[in-house]
Image: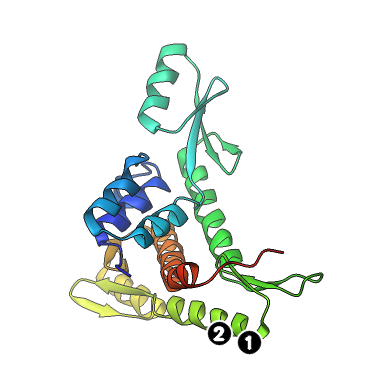
Amino acid sequence: MKFLSKSMFALILATSTAVFAAETDAVSSADAKTCAKACASTGGESTCAVSTAMGKLPKMTFAVGGESICCGEMAKAKASEIGKPVEFVVDEEKFDSESKAFTALVSHTEKFVEEFTTPHTCSVSGNTTIAGETSACSVKAGELTSKVKLAMSKISMSYKVGDKECSCPVEAAALAKAADTKKTMIVDGEETTCDQSARLKLAVAKYKAAVLAMAPEASDSKTVTN
């Protein structure tokens, strides 16, 4: 099993966000060739499976004059052409500003990840599903749940203020206030000074960890469906 490189992870994250502001990181859209390139470069189908899973995260898209557009720049061009405003869409919910849409994207992503990584047991079949895997055995389901939780527990947010680093948000806030500057949040090696962007990065990083933890299960056993 080969882990995604940070550049690949950055590209995957880019598909879930739009250009929000300078401090929320510049992003770009990925096309269908991304997975093929990943397989070609790593030689592993599991990487493609992970890329596919990451592509299921909530995304921000755009609409102009009733037409759905996936690219922000294309949406702006279309809006200028027909004299209509750009609408920002997250899970079919439309917003009149990118900031409102980005806030919704963060919340929807956190909810999606929580749902994905929480075990659900069918009242009819008794099968338990977590992180895309379903098991009819309660012991096996418990093992899968533990595996997911362990993987996610290794993902955390740390903080940096000047040359000082810490893991406590309260301490980071105090340091930032004393230095009259913004705190920098670090998730999986990625830095940002935007709280919303940090939340999104944390949710996506935890999701990636859960998906990677379950990838061997997908290849070693058949998934039981309800």
Q: Mark 2 falls on what kind of element?
A: helix
How far apart in space, not on screen, are marks 2 and 1 (Cα)? 6 Å
Residue 206 in the image: x percent, y percent? 44, 69
Residue 73 in the image: x percent, y percent? 35, 29
Question: Image point 39% across, 46% down: which residue?
Answer: 15
Question: Image point 36% across, 80% down: which residue?
Answer: 171
Q: Is residue 179 left or right of residue 85?
A: left
Residue bearing the label numbered 1: 139
Question: Image point 52% across, 56% down: which residue?
Answer: 109
Q: Mark 1 falls on what kind of element?
A: helix
**Vertical arrangement, residue 81 with respect to residue 34, above or below:** above
| Image quarter in which the C terminus is found | bottom right
Q: Is residue 18 left or right of residue 42?
A: right
Residue 92 in the image: x percent, y percent? 61, 39
Q: Residue furthest top?
A: 82
Question: Image point 29% across, 53% down: which residue?
Answer: 39
Tell me the number on the disc at residue 143: 2
